[in-house]
Amino acid sequence: MNIKLKALLKSPWVFHLSTGSCNNCDIEILDCLTPRFDIERFGMLLAGSIKHADVLLITGSGNRKSIERLRRLYEQTPKPCLVVAVGECALSRGMFIDSYNCPLPIDKVIPVDVYIPGCPPKPEAIIAGVVRLIEKVKKSAAKK
Amino acid sequence: MIYIFGFLVFGFLLTAIIGLFASWIDRKITARIQYRVGPPLLQPLIDIIKLLGKETLIPIGASKFVFLSAPIIGFTSVLLVSTLLWINNIYYDKSFLGDLIVVLYFLIIPSISIIMGGFVSKNPLASLGASREVKLVLSYELPFILVVLVAVIKSGYTYRLRDILDFQIRNGFIVRSWSGALALIVAIICMQAKLALVPFDIPEAETEIVGGPLIEYSGPGLAIYRLMKNMLMFTVPFFLIIVFIGGARLDGIYLLYGVLKYIGLVALMTVIRNTNPRVRIDQAVKFFWGPVTIIAIIAIILALLGR
């Protein structure tokens, strides 16, 4: 594994995007930064601007208006970047699967690296998901 | 020759290492104050390495040359300042007349590079942050220069950092007099604004204008800006240590004293940063041009009276 990827995994800065969620997943994500869980131990920070981010955390069901923004934000993220879908809505549109306003699941729009299920997922589940993401990147780098 | 050596080893390498370490101390103390664990020791360095390996995005309509050269201008000026300061502490005879003025000028250029980068980004939030930075520079520069004048007056009207240091070795630290103590307090407040730490982090208010002037920077540009800020976290306190608290030396017990002075200043900065709310830009300008400037003028009058 080259030093670039190693450093990326040691300090992933997270940009947090809600594509029409009910805010529960977003609150759980913010919980990860609180003293009880403190993901800054692993070098993770919440980035304010997409240009600073390495990981795109997506919550919500992806409605017609926000899908466009999601695509544009993904294009603006400096590569290499990783995408994580958090919560049932982002995985499979949840209870909005038959809604007229949610035509596509998020992984049909942009490539998603790791899915974190739950409605909402606990902070422990989110941290476990990030660990899974890091292991996945390590494995795919080892294959190459 | 000695200048090139000093530039590379002390100005760049040592300053960068100490600056990164200081930024780790800052983050760790912040975390401990909030009952968190905080990042590991190498985290600031890993952040920089990661940013160097990422893609550079240039916004449409931004001038490519200015956008990419702004971080380098700021970084170079910090390098020059730290080299000058180290040379004054280590190779006494190599300093020149008027280097105090040179240092004061070069310490403004990092702010100017941030202003350039913000205005060229073609982003409304970045422009807003840059215009706030302009106002902040205008407000804190006046008291900062006034309090540096206190040290100049005390040490017999010299504009040479080495002479100020010699005066302090012979007659005791400038901060021991009434005027020096007042001046150091004002200088610490101005340093907080110069480093854009919390009571005066108005230009890059993360919760209002998400990072301010640096919002469009990604990859190596952002890495250079971060390294510049980390090195400023060493350079500005070091300047205050030289002017008011007698400098640092690399031999024997004096090395320990120098380290203690520096860590004390960094810890003070971090505690101020963690126990204060952010002020508005108009409040900051009023604060610096009102009470802070008056205290600075009182310090100058006391210094002229010889106290």
Image: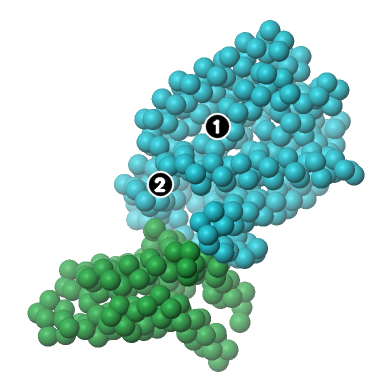
Quadrant of res B301:
top right
In the rendered view, tell whether residue B187 sits above or below residue A3: above
Q: Check the rendered structure and report the hue given to chain A.
A: green
Amino acid bearing label 2: Ala
Residue A22 visible to the viewer? yes
At numbered mark 1, what does the secondary structure look like: helix, strand or loop?
helix
Residue wearing tag 2: B205
Residue shown at 61% from the left, 78% from the top: A2
Closer to the N terminus: mark 1 or mark 2?
Answer: 1
> Are the residues under badges 1 and 2 in a single subunit?
yes
Q: The disc labelled 1 sits on which kind of residue? A: Cys
Residue at 37% over, 51% down: B207
Q: What chain does badge 2 belong to?
A: B
For image coordinates 67% across by 33% down, the residue present is B240
Measuring from the top left, give residue B135's x and y in whole percent: 42, 31
State the hue of chain B.
cyan
